[in-house]
Amino acid sequence: MDKKGVVIVEDHPVFRQGLKEILRGEPDMTVLGETADGGEAIELIRSLNPDVILLDVNLPGMNGLQIVRQLKSDRNKALIIMLTAYDDAQQGVHALRAGAHAFCPKDVQPQKLVEVLRHVLRGHFVVGDQLFDRDGVDEWIEKQVSQAGRPILDEMQEMYSPLSPREMQILQYVTRGLSNKEIASTLGISHQTVKNHMTAILHKLDVEDRTQAAVYALRHGWVRLQDSQK
């Protein structure tokens, strides 16, 4: 039997072990590897070339959305199922726009997760209990954005587009309490460049100030509280 290879990227040991146990009982799936660190995930995935990735949103190093963006930039063909404790439609839009194929809450039942895996392997997209084809998921995303009260904008400006790697990096420093000047010094870029990135961040997240941006990032699991305290 041709087994589908899975890589698990999850930093909670108990939950990660649970995922491995679930997959161990499936005769057509095998766990190729695992990591708890977002920064290590890219190289692990590149080396193992899995069919599917079970990917947490909230990770040390790089968060799940950053990992998805990098993999898509690499034209990596792995199918991605994002797992999160932050289960809401807005998060689902972020995940699917970044390039994920499914978005599941971490309290998903084991058999349901296996079903999601199989749906994704057949070419479907899954959000909660909803199953879509490519056209269907595009319509779902458009509906969610419309309901949010914002017009559909260009992809790079749209509020649901995940932040760029540099913007995410700056936002991580913001959650640590660094000023724009301190961020500029740390990253070796100009103060004006940091200000420009902050303007883009506030626009994309539809928030009014740095504090709201930091709270948004923490609430959605894009940056980790422990990381922001380092």
Image (cartoon, rainbow, N blue to C red):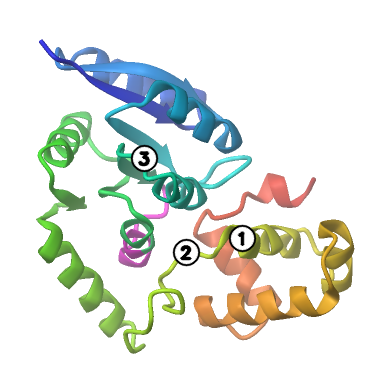
Of residue 138 and residue 9, the one placed in the foreground of this image is 138
Please provide percent x and percent y for residue 32.
36, 17
Residue holding disc 3: 76
**Which of 61 and 19 lies nearest the eye of the viewer?**
61
Dividing the picture into quadrants, the one containing residue 150 is bottom left
Check residue 144 in the rendering and tell me which mark sits there, or answer none: none
Q: Residue at x 34, y 54 (%)?
A: 99
User: Any magenta on residue 121?
Assistant: no
In this view, 144 is above or below 19:
below
* Residue 14 in sight here: no
Label for residue 162?
Answer: 2
> What distance separates the C-alpha of mark 2 from that of mark 3?
18 Å
In percent of the image, x 52 and y 46: which residue is there? 58
**Does the CB distance between marks 1 and 2 fall below 8 Å?**
yes
What are the residue bounds of the magenta stretch?
85-93
- Name the one closer to the observer, 201 or 191: 191
Percent x, y for residue 152?
32, 84
Q: Does label 1 or label 2 sit earlier along the sequence?
A: 2
| Circle 2: residue type | Pro
Mark 2, other Cα within 10 Å: few <14 / some 14–19 / many ≥20: many
- Kind of residue indicated by mark 1: Met
